[in-house]
Image: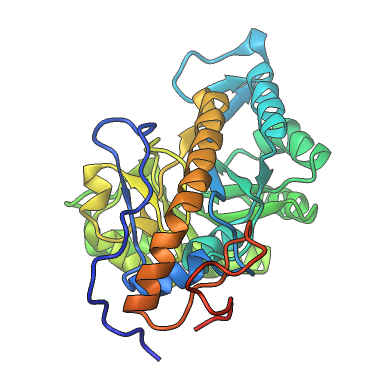
Amino acid sequence: MPSPAPTLPPPAPFSTARLRPGVAATAYVDDACRALRLRWDPDGSPPGTVVAPIMFHSVRHPNDMLHDSVTISTDDLQVITDRARALGFQTITSEELAGFLEENRRIPARSMIWIVDDRRPGTVEQYLLPQVEANDWTLTLGWIIADTRPDLWAWMERLNATGRLDVQSHGYWHTYIVPETPDETVRQEIVDPIPILKEHFGQRPIAFVWPGGNFTEHSVEVARQAGYRLGFTAFSRGPLLFNWIPLGEGEAAVGDPVMVLPRFWSTAAAVNLDQAASVAEESEAFAHESYPAEAAWYRASCGGELPLPPWETSTVPGQASASHS
């Protein structure tokens, strides 16, 4: 049944000073009653659960570095890994992230998704998979379809057999999508990779990694129509919480936050993991403070009662039970 029409505005959402100017956290669950039910679902992820998406490109030995904006050294990679472990981060897949964002399904309290853009099987096998296997993690790939040779498909299928990879789409030709891009090109980039990736990896992609980070309102609509549940830009805006995605003005204008998700760059990932952990702590503390107001608003506006918060062992004053509405 639909929730009753709320008569009062819901309590103010979580906010933090850790986002850069021009970046605003955006909610995407339209039904405020449903958002609160999911937020406090005892079977879901508790408030304070955070996700740090990290974008990787090239990894090289320190004595063979490229001086660009996307290459990190093997030493840098080890720093990221060590910092993630020290802070308690674990990786999740695209499917797990989609479940968390859509329905607050349970994931590790400090989660990250490592996404490797472009066709980089050498980087994956030589540098990233060893870290992933040593820590019992997974690795998400944004794979480009065109010009994939038979031997490259075989290589990728062999790596996929490790069970560590989560292969998603990064376009057909890796064409940057701008307002002037013809519709047929947009659809080729977004739709055509789906059956090909399914053929080679046994499951259809649910995440689209925008080539070059570029997208348009139309292309987001096409991706949704094609069945994608997630989209990733190349903007470093901040970490993700349930129903809370930090966006810049351009992403917010699209009106579908889950299809224009931000990603941290590997060149600053260790610092960004610290930021994500701090946001997680702040949002958990905010949840402790805001639960009474949220429970009261839910009772008055939605009917029924919110479940007790995970840190409570007795009935909250004025709340008859911890049952779901």
Closer to us: 15 or 232: 15
Seen in the picture, residue 169 relative to 73 is either above or below; the reply is: below
Let me know if residue 226 appears in the view: no
Let me know if residue 246 appears in the view: yes
Q: How is the image coloured?
A: rainbow
Q: Most extreme residue toward the right, as rendered? A: 134
Question: Residue at the spot x=33%, y=73% of the render?
Answer: 31
Closer to us: 217 or 121: 217
- Relative placement, left or right, of 159 versus 277 is right
Residue 95 percent coordinates (x, y)? 59, 63
Residue 70 percent coordinates (x, y)? 48, 25
Closer to us: 44 or 223: 44
Question: Residue at the spot x=60%, y=44% of the render?
Answer: 112
Q: Most extreme residue toward the top, as rendered? A: 63
Residue 245 percent coordinates (x, y)? 39, 50
Question: Residue at the spot x=54%, y=67% of the render?
Answer: 316
- Relative placement, left or right, of 200 versus 11 is right
